[in-house]
Structures are given as C-alpha cells and as structure tokens.
Image: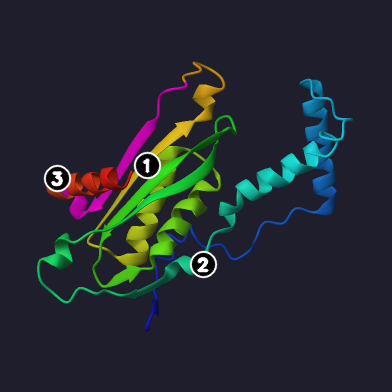
Amino acid sequence: MNFVRLEADETDRSWERLHPRHVSEEQWTRFESHIREIFGAFGMELDTPGTERTPARFLHALFDATAGYEGDPKLVTAFPTECHGGPDCRLSQVVEGPIAFYSLCEHHALPFFGHAYVGYIAHEHIIGISKLTRLVRMYAARFSVQERIGHEVVTALESILGAHGVAVYLQATHLCTQMRGVRDTESGTRTTFWRGNYEHEPELRAEFMRLCAATA
C-alpha cells in the first residue's frame, strides 16, 4: 500500500521529539531517597517485604506514566484519501472511540482517566486508525489537564492531516476531586473541541456526538 510522510508545520510538532528523556543513575538514587523520606514521614513503614522497594517502584511507575513527553514520530505517517469527489468528501466522518486514556493532573499529580472519541473529515489524507489511539495516549501520558489534552489532540490532528474538520470529545474521572477536596465520587468531566467544518455545521457536531454515544 502506498503511504506518504506528511510535512507538518515545523512550529507545531509537539508530538515529535528528537531526544528521549535521560535520568542519570545519580539522579535515580537521589530521587528515590527523597521519595523514601516523604513516604516515611507520611506514615509508610518502609522496612517490610512489600514496601522496601516501593519508593523505587513508584519512581519508575511515574517515569513510565509520563512517557508522552518523548513524543511519537510515527504519527505523521498517513495515506491518500479514499474520497474522490462529491459531497462525501465534505461530510463523511471517520470516528474512533472509545479510546481509553490515563493521565496525571498537573495540579496534584493524581490520576484522571476516561475515554476519548476522535473524529475527522478527510481531505487529501487519512491516518491509520491505530494512530488516533497513539495520539490521544501520547498527550495523556504527561502531567496535564483534560482541556489541554483535547486541545493538543485536535490541533495536532488538524496539522498532520489538513482535514476539512476535526472533532474531539473527552470524558474523564478525576481522582483529585474524589480522593481529596470535595470528595465527589459521582461526577465526571466532559469536554469537546471542534475545528474546521465542525465549527460551522451543528449537524456535523450532532452526528459526531450521536456516533460517540452509540459506541459508549
């Protein structure tokens, strides 16, 4: 199958980083010592078989959970559109979801998680379905907020594809409101983001939301 590597705007390549993060052995040791001190001060017994390695495991888990900062250069691989003229080229949507994602709130470093739905109206290119999942999860795997993840996904996809329109819908549960503060265990947060044709055509937005509900 033919594919192309799109030349996205050089000023908006936040999905692509040239250098992975590097933490030296000295830094790992120092960070682990700080975490051990904090956990101990908060009451954890650190000399049991189950907890003696907890500071190290926590540190590595946090590093893994924020791997999205390293980007994903494979995301700019796309394919020629399947549309060859006619109204479908301006109206037909590609919708993927629910895409499960997990992130860490930048305000409290506590998890928030949920599902994303991503839609677009192709112009000259389409993107592999798996890339939509990779795009969402890459931006989620950072210290972030729900609103930013949606904005980053819709902006990146618009830049990568040059689509007629892009839509993103996120629904998430935030542990920073359930484990602390108001301790609200029932509420969820929903956010929508629109670009191109979706901004100006309420029928497209309504159809997108119907498709999201049908797959929920």
**Residue in the foreground of this view, choosing between 179 and 24:** 179
Q: Secondary structure at mark 1?
A: strand
Going from the N terminus, do you reach mark 3 or mark 2 first?
2
Whether 27 is drawn above or below 42: the answer is below
- Residue 101 within the segment the image draws in magenta: no
Is 140 positioned to the left or the right of 49 in the image? Answer: left
- Is residue 26 shown left or right of residue 145? right
Q: Nearer the viewer, residue 173 or 146?
A: 173
Which callout, 2 or 1, points to the residue nearer the camera? 1
Q: CA distance from mark 2 to mark 1?
A: 24 Å
**Mark 3: which amino acid?**
Pro
Q: Is residue 33 left or right of residue 191?
A: right
Where residue 76 sits, quadrant-wise, is: bottom left
* Badge 3 element: helix
Mark 2 lies on a secondary structure that is: helix
User: Dot 2 corresponds to which residue?
Assistant: 73
Tell me where residue 58 appears, x and y as whole percent. 73, 40
Tell me, for residue 170, which label it has, or none.
1
Q: Quadrant of the C terminus?
A: top left
Residue in the picture at 47% in, 22% down: 185
| Crowd tier of the residue under label 3, counting other residues whose Cα lies within 10 Å: few below 14, some 14–19, many 20 or above | few
| Distance Cα–Cα, label 3 vs label 2 | 34 Å
Q: Going 55% across and 48% down the picture, which residue do you hit?
A: 141
Residue 40: quadrant of the picture? top right
Q: Residue at x 31, y 41 (%)?
A: 192
Q: Which residues are magenta?
A: 185-201
Find out whether the residues at labels 2 and 1 contact each other: C-beta distance under 8 Å. Answer: no
Q: State the image coordinates of residue 96 (x, y, percent, origin top left).
A: 34, 55
CB contact under 8 Å: marks 3 and 1: no
Which residue is identified by label 3? 202
The crowding category of the residue bearing disc 2, from other C-alpha atoms within 10 Å (few below 14, some 14 to 19, many at least 20), is: few
